[in-house]
Image (cartoon, rainbow, N blue to C red):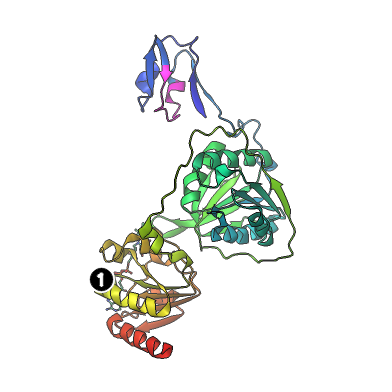
Amino acid sequence: MSVIINRDKCNGCETCVSVCPFTAIEIKDGKAFINEYCQICMACITACPEGAIKEIPEEGTQQSAISYQPSAYKGVWIFAEQREKDLASVSLELLGVGRRLADELRAELSAVLFGAAENNAHELIKWGADKVYHAKDTIFEKFNDEPYSKLLVRLINDYKPAIVLAGATLIGRSFIPRVAARLRTGLTADCTSLEIEKETGNLLQIRPAFGGNIMATILCPNYRPQIATVRPRVMKKGEYNPDRKGELIAVNAENLACRTKVIETVKETSECKVNLQEADIIIAGGRGIGGTKGFELLTELAESLGGTVGASRAAVDEGWIPYSHQVGQTGKTVCPKIYIACGISGAVQHLVGMQSSDIIIAINKNPEAPIFNVATYGIVGDIFEVLPLLIKKIKELKA
Ligand SMILES: Cc1cc2nc3c(=O)[nH]c(=O)nc-3n(C[C@H](O)[C@H](O)[C@H](O)COP(=O)(O)OP(=O)(O)OC[C@H]3O[C@@H](n4cnc5c(N)ncnc54)[C@H](O)[C@@H]3O)c2cc1C
């Protein structure tokens, strides 16, 4: 969407200049001129007494309300993210939930893949997709919001899926809101569960709200597609079938008219060291750990088990460990085989980030701590007595 001025109608009255909250309109040669600060808030359009300002849709923007028919939108799509040409595991998790939703709707499940090799597209079929829309142009190798959002919008307008799912990753969080805005539809971020409403076929998008104190069910009944993002490790992967057949559709990405290009991507080294989301064993510490000395004990246990150290927000806020280790609503969502929670009370904001772990072991001196409600095994005791015993035992067993 952009805003333009009809210079024939404009009489330079400056009404638009005074209403613009972004100082995006100037008078040049007696006529209004819109500069680069325009946020398309449209305040000038209603204010102009001459009707000289109007909005024009950009390429791919959803049709006017008159021609827009939600019933024309069918099927479930997932955006399959790739990093350095390899599929991100969240893509396979989205195929798991997408397959279930598509089966309930008796619809097709399609994946959209930008920039990876063709064998990845075939892998998506084996993980559950009926169709894969694949654009392999080099422009997609490194993530860039502009071409990614332009092409996804174009594909959605052409093929009209009813549901689009993407990962709530750095990439998904960056460009999916832009896609939703271009299409003038809704987006629910960070869903923890997705269901189909039996009576209507609408997508029930469930996520924590109000600081995690309630679970909200969000609907987008009047616009299509219904777009939702899901954090990595929240959903389980689907079933892998090496004999599964599907359709591969090569996508033409010509004429995207991009103004930006990615020259270089630099990884932040401190973040790279902590790969909580891929870890099989996480030993997490909370306020009960008491300080950096306590975290040294956790690191020793993690090293003896081949695990990674996680933390509650309280421990991060105390400055005992960097934010990159935080698990929970405002940290990472993890799903390891074993999660050992040490001195963590079990606040709901922490639980939403780890309660899908296969085995949860909680160590806490308070037998009433809510963490025990989700724990597979609970040890009531002082961390500083329990952990050294545990480390000693593990070392003995390994020896
Ligand atoms: C919007 C919002 C987002 C949030 N996001 C997150 C998030 O992403 N992640 C997160 O973790 N929190 C988050 N929080 C904070 C959350 O509400 C809790 O405050 C936090 O999880 C508490 O951390 P804790 O369990 O380490 O500390 P506490 O609640 O203080 O619990 C400490 C526990 O340690 C036990 N203990 C103390 N000493 C010992 C000992 N020697 N041995 C054994 N046990 C001991 C105590 O019995 C207690 O249960 C968020 C809050 C809000 C409002």
Q: Which residue occupies 52% across, 30% down?
A: 1
Number of labels in the image equals 1
Could you say which quadrant of the image residue 25 lies in? top left
Say above or below: 395 vs 32: below
Magenta run includes residue 248: no
Query: Which region shows up in magenta?
Result: 33-46
Q: Disc 1 marks which amino acid?
A: Thr
Query: Which residue carries the number 1 mark?
Result: 292
* Image spot of residue 293 (x, y percent): 25, 74
Q: Nearer the viewer, residue 134 or 295?
A: 134
Q: Nearer the viewer, residue 262 or 359?
A: 262
Image quarter (top left, top right, bottom left or bottom right) of the C terminus: bottom left
Say above or below: 310 vs 170: below
Q: Which residue occupies 48% across, 57% down?
A: 207
Query: Can see residue 220?
Result: yes
Say above or below: 111 vs 397: above
* Image spot of residue 240 (x, y percent): 66, 66
* Image spot of residue 278 (x, y percent): 48, 66
Distance from mark 1 CB to nearest ligand 1 atom below 8 Å: no
Q: Which residue occupies 46% across, 79% down?
A: 376
Residue neighbourhood size for the residue with mark 1, other residues' Cα within 10 Å, grouped as few (<14), some (14–19), many (≥20): some
Could you say which quadrant of the image residue 250 lies in? top right
Q: Secondary structure at mark 1?
A: helix
* Image spot of residue 37 (x, y percent): 39, 28
- Side of 321 relative to 258 (left or right): left
- Side of 294 relative to 263 (left or right): left
Query: Can see residue 185?
Result: no
Q: Nearer the viewer, residue 16 or 38?
A: 38
User: Which image quadrant shows ligand 1?
Assistant: bottom left
Magenta run includes residue 36: yes
Q: Which residue occupies 65% across, 57% down?
A: 124
